Image (cartoon, grey):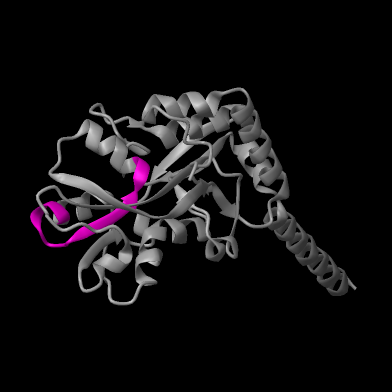
């Protein structure tokens, strides 16, 4: 009798544990971050002017300011997790952080894996080459048979590899391929238009911009699917920041223009 009772209690305990595990698994990301009090935000940390280190070691940049404004609206604090770009998407899939706020372009392929917020930045793909290079690369077609440097796992890598004949060289971050471009190990590089606008203004480098590839590239905030409460709270916060002019002020601070609106073709 006692053995049967113990078996029944054990079975009920297992059912309860399974229910609790399922409930925990199904908990919306909004509930998790509210309970924790922080939003775990991955960013590259070496991608000026979006996210990089100031001389005192503090993370600064356009994306850092955007992230701080968003979490303030959500009533929580940011927990920034610098991550090399080559592993940042996999890190989000593995649950190492809650979101990425580091100029993640919205693509159809990425939308099959993650949900995205509304876009908060619009840019374009920019080709760059050495300043003393007399050649002119206006398109990816011009780079057939040439070496083109791009960030590993970026939209720019996908765009470059879609053009047969381009020798695509991948790098872990922006400084790495700019260094190889300057030293002559590659013929050109492709990066974010806004990055080059900022870098060429702030840093004397022997490189110049050449062609713009494609049209508007919207960037947004990816997070795991199945979090409708978080998705709505995030979009509501971003809509308010767009409406009250906060995104515009942050844009003008870093670029002198409003990059939160689509580029006029």
| Residue sticking out furthest to the right | 1
Please indicate, yes or no, whether residue 97 appears anywhere in the rendered image: no
Between 31 and 143, the one lying in front of the other is 143
| Highlighted range, magenta | 181-194
Judge left or right: residue 264 versus residue 133. Answer: right
Q: Position of residue 10 (x, y in %)?
A: 78, 67
How far across and how far down the image is residue 121, in percent? 49, 41
The residue located at (48%, 42%) in the rendering is 263
Q: Nearer the viewer, residue 8 or 212?
A: 212
Compared to residue 232, the image places residue 62 above or below, namely: above
State yes or no: residue 189 in magenta: yes
Relative placement, left or right, of 32 versus 10 is left
Left or right for 114, reference 45? right
Please tell me which residue is depicted at 48% across the width and 43% down the height of the picture.
122
Residue 148's x, y, as percent? 24, 63
Considering only vertical position in the picture, is 9 above or below 261? below
Looking at the picture, tell me which residue is in the foreground, 131 or 47: 131
Quarter assignment of residue 36: top right
Q: Image quadrant of residue 168? A: bottom left
Q: Residue at x 54, y 39 (%)?
A: 39
The question of residue 6 being in magenta is answered with no
Quadrant assignment, res 153:
bottom left
């Amino acid at each position: 009798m006692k053995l049967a009772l113990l078996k029944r209690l054990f079975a009920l305990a297992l059912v309860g544990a399974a229910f609790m595990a399922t409930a925990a698994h199904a908990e919306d990301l909004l509930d998790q971050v509210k309970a924790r009090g922080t939003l775990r935000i991955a960013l590259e940390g070496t991608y000026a002017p979006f996210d990089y280190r100031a001389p005192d070691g503090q993370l600064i940049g356009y994306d850092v300011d955007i992230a701080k404004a968003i979490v303030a609206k959500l009533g929580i604090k940011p927990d920034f997790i610098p991550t090399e770009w080559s592993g940042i998407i996999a890190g989000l899939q593995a649950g190492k952080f809650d979101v990425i706020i580091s100029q993640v372009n919205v693509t159809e392929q990425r939308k099959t894996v993650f949900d995205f917020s509304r876009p908060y930045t619009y840019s374009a793909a920019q080709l760059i080459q050495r300043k003393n290079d007399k050649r002119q690369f206006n398109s990816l077609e011009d780079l057939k048979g040439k070496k083109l440097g791009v960030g590993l796992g970026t939209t720019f890598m996908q765009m470059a590899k879609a053009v047969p004949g381009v020798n695509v060289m991948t790098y872990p971050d922006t400084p790495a391929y700019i260094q190889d471009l300057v030293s002559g190990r590659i013929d050109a590089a492709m990066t974010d238009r806004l990055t080059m606008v900022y870098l060429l203004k702030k840093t004397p480098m022997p490189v110049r911009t050449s062609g713009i590839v494609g049209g508007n590239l919207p960037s947004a905030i990816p997070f795991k699917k199945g979090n409708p409460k978080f998705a709505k709270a995030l979009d509501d916060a971003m809509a308010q920041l767009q409406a009250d002019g906060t995104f515009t002020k942050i844009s003008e601070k870093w670029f002198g223009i409003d990059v939160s609106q689509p580029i006029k073709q």
